[in-house]
């Protein structure tokens, strides 16, 4: 069977549809892959991300501190955006890298983040993502390697660009 | 009417402690109303917006203890936006201005600021007890004020709060002269703790009975603390990630052996299971054990511990205990009254064979005849199991079952769970609190309305088919006080059928249901004693009249009875009709 979307389905033996319904298999996978924000080569990934397990807000009815404590696979942090009435919470463990996280934030709050450069931070859109680390300091998102960031990030704040330079 | 002088009647009233009974007494006649209100020491306010501080103080000028609850229950699960309300500051300000000699303040789901805590600490010379549950908005600076200024402080109990930890030295702020502490619980603090200050504080608190530590208190410190406080009744262990060295372990064992009064154990926030044996000597005395934060304690370690706890009355645990572990509980803990089983793998990502099922629930019901309260998270359930549970345990007062996947049917018959829950409400005549889950039709609500005569609180999620479901409940459960519903197809017909009913209840919550703006408006129209709040998810607040579509579904509706009208502190995205 030919390789499709960078994935050799036969090899990985995906069983998303009924046996024989190989057309369906391809459709499901490609649909999932187009939702998949990963830009790097994840063709070694065997199973597709689980859309069926989309998280319903407030379900199951367990307090966030319990969720974070009991399941090391989740890490909920608060996200605030200057000017938005609500704070939100996201699970940092859902993302593997900065582009994924930023995309999710952009979707959640309906804004676009600027162009990141090491020298100048975020330029262009007027919104700057920042986070509070374990020491209580406010840092620019993107400076440190992803793993270091995700294990030390306590809170996120999307600042309006005009405030960012002086505040940081 | 009065054959006795007021002082005698007042003395008699002193024996009447429950709030409801005292409320009833005050309705008998004017004279009793007056005597009662002037002698009332403890006041409980289940909804801080049902009344205001001025009226509270006017009626009960001699009050010493106040309990206030703010946000609705679903706020615990992020369903209530951040700035919704529940601010305690106006209450503290009003009490401070008055002559009330406040001694105890208990708050649940309220917004507490450092400013409020500072004001509290300075305004009441005899202040003794502060209990904060599920609150937020303050930092350790606020705690420092309490520590520094409350000279008579006996109790500082912080449960499940969101506290900004400024890593300050709040423990140092307790003056050396402070020796009155009976209870100190800071388990929910995330930052570092000044262990030396803590040790000094414990050493000078001979009356300390309850101590609950946070993550930051390591093993060797725990041993020293327990040596200073062998009189402890209630202990919350912090954490110690490393394998204990034999010397530390031995010291811990020695300290624990002396704590013959220890009855309640909790915490184990990040605990190496190998430390558990140090606690074996006191297990036989335990009546309460909370391991629901102890993700690292599993399997045999857990089972060995439980097998020693023969007198246990209350157990909070993670579902990693499994059906096998629950069978051990059933065989060992014959005095068990309350069980809570929390999910350890919240999103079902791991193929967790060890999680609990209906088998564990039935085993517990069969083995523990005194069981009256249960909270049980599981992945699957059957009607047969629920029917068996109902037969084994007709004494349930609280029954909360949460099947993790919404709409999940009986996993053997694929039917709805109507019959199972029906059996529970029919058998448990004293049932006061119920949470339902899984695949449920209107039928289950028919049963609830028919049989659950004592039901006061009902939580519904992803259940029911039509308005009839909600109507069965509203018509049947005469004692209903709190009804909370999410993601269920109940609409205006149910909402509006009996508007007067809501004044007999504390509150109603409906989110992601079928009620519309028009329905809510009609509800609010002739109900001056109800606050009908609409919480609008959408940032583009469609507040303008001309854009308003009455057929539009309301995201979140929260209504509650009140005698003080519309509140003034609501944020812009909360609309009070």
Image (tube, coloured by chain):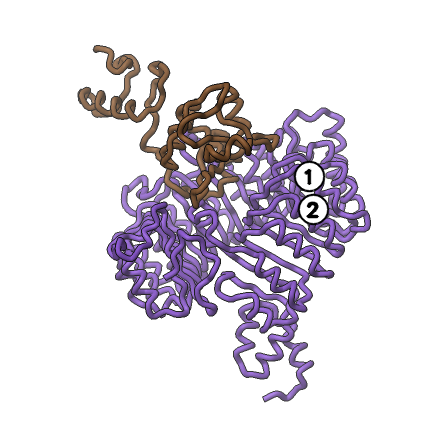
Chain colours: A brown, B purple
Between B3 and B311, the residue placed more toward the observer is B3
**Residue B162 location, x and y as percent?**
56, 44
Q: Quadrant of residue B265?
A: top right
Residue found at x 59% / y 81% = B32
Relative to B455, B186 lies left or right: right
Give the mark nearer the N terminus: 2 vs 1: 2
Q: Quadrant of residue B562?
A: bottom left
Q: Is residue A38 visible?
A: yes
SS label for mark 1: loop
Can marks 2 and 1 be said to lie on one chain? Answer: yes
Residue placed under numbered mark 2 in the picture: B144
Q: Is residue B387 visible?
A: no
Relative to B356, B301 lies left or right: right
Q: Quadrant of residue B54?
A: bottom right
Quarter that holds the C terminus of chain B: bottom left
Residue found at x 47% / y 39% = A80
Residue found at x 36% / y 16% = A42
**Residue B99 in the image: above or below residue A33:** below
Task: Please give the label number shown on residue B295.
Answer: none
Chain ID at mark 1: B
Mark 2 vs mark 1, CA separation in Å: 8 Å
Between B21 and B93, the residue placed more toward the observer is B93
Relative to B102, A39 lies left or right: left
Residue placed under numbered mark 1 in the picture: B168
**Residue B256 location, x and y as percent?**
73, 39
For the residues bearing labels 2 and 1, Cβ distance under 8 angstroms: yes
């Amino acid at each position: 069977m030919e390789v499709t979307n960078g994935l050799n389905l036969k090899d990985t033996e995906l069983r998303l549809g009924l046996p024989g319904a190989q057309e369906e298999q391809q459709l499901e996978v490609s649909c999932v892959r187009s939702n998949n924000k990963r830009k790097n080569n994840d063709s070694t990934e065997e199973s597709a991300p689980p859309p069926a397990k989309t998280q319903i807000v407030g379900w199951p009815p367990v307090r966030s501190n319990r969720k974070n404590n009991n399941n090391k696979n989740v890490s909920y942090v608060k996200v605030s955006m200057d000017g938005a009435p609500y704070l939100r919470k996201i699970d940092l463990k859902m993302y593997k890298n900065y582009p994924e996280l930023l995309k999710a934030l952009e979707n959640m709050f309906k804004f676009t983040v600027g162009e990141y450069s090491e020298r100048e931070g975020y330029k262009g859109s007027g919104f700057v993502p920042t986070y509070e680390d374990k020491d209580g300091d406010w840092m620019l998102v993107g400076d440190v390697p992803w793993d270091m960031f995700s294990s030390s990030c306590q809170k996120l704040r999307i600042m309006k660009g005009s405030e960012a330079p002086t505040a940081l | 009417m009065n054959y006795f002088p007021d002082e005698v009647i007042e003395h008699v009233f002193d024996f009447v402690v429950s709030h409801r009974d005292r409320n009833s007494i005050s309705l008998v006649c004017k004279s009793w109303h007056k005597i009662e209100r002037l002698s009332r020491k403890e006041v409980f306010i289940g909804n801080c917006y049902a009344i205001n501080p001025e009226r509270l103080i006017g009626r009960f000028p001699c009050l010493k203890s106040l309990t206030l609850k703010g946000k609705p229950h679903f706020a615990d699960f992020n369903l209530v936006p951040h700035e919704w309300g529940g601010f305690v500051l106006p209450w503290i300000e009003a009490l401070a201005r008055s002559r009330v000699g406040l001694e105890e303040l208990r708050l649940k789901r309220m917004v507490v600021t450092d400013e409020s805590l500072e004001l509290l600490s300075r305004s009441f010379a005899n202040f003794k007890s502060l209990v904060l549950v599920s609150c937020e908005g303050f930092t350790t600076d606020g705690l420092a004020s309490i520590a520094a200024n409350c000279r008579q402080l006996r109790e500082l109990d912080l449960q499940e709060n969101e506290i900004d930890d400024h890593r300050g030295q709040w423990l140092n702020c307790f003056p050396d002269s402070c020796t009155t502490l009976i209870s100190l619980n800071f388990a929910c603090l995330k930052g570092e703790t000044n262990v030396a200050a803590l040790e000094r504080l414990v050493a000078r608190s001979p009356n300390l009975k309850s101590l609950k530590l946070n993550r930051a208190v390591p093993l060797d410190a725990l041993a020293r603390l327990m040596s200073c406080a062998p009189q402890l009744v209630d202990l919350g262990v912090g954490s110690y990630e490393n394998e204990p060295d034999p010397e530390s372990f031995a010291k811990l064992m020695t300290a624990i052996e002396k704590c013959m009064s220890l009855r309640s154990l909790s915490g184990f926030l990040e605990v190496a299971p190998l430390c558990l044996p140090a606690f074996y000597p006191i297990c036989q005395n335990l009546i309460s054990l909370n391991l629901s934060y102890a993700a690292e304690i599993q399997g045999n370690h857990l089972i060995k511990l439980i097998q020693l706890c023969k007198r246990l009355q209350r157990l909070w645990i993670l579902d990693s205990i499994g059906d096998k572990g629950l069978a051990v509980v059933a065989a060992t803990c014959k005095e068990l009254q309350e069980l809570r089983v929390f999910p350890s793998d919240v999103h079902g990502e791991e193929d967790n064979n060890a999680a609990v099922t209906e088998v564990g629930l039935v085993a517990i019901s069969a083995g523990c005849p005194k069981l009256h309260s249960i909270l049980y998270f599981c992945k699957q359930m059957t009607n047969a199991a629920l029917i068996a549970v109902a037969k084994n345990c007709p004494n349930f007062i609280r029954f909360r079952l949460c099947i993790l996947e919404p709409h999940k049917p009986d996993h053997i018959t694929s039917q709805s769970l109507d019959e199972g829950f029906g059996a529970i409400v029919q058998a448990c005549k004293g049932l006061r609190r119920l949470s339902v889950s899984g695949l449920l039709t209107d039928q289950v609500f028919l049963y609830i309305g028919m049989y659950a005569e004592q039901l006061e609180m009902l939580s519904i999620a992803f259940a029911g088919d039509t308005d009839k479901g909600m109507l069965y409940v509203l018509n049947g459960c005469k004692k209903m006080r709190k009804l909370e519903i999410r993601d269920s197809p109940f609409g205006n017909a149910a909402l509006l059928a009996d508007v007067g009913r809501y004044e007999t209840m504390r509150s109603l919550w409906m989110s992601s249901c079928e009620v519309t703006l028009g329905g809510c408006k009609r509800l609010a129209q002739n109900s001056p004693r109800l606050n009908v709040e609409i919480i609008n998810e959408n940032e583009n607040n469609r507040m303008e009249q001309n854009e308003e579509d009455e057929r539009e579904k309301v995201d979140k509706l929260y209504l509650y009875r009140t005698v003080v009208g519309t509140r003034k502190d609501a944020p812009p995205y909360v609309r009070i009709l």
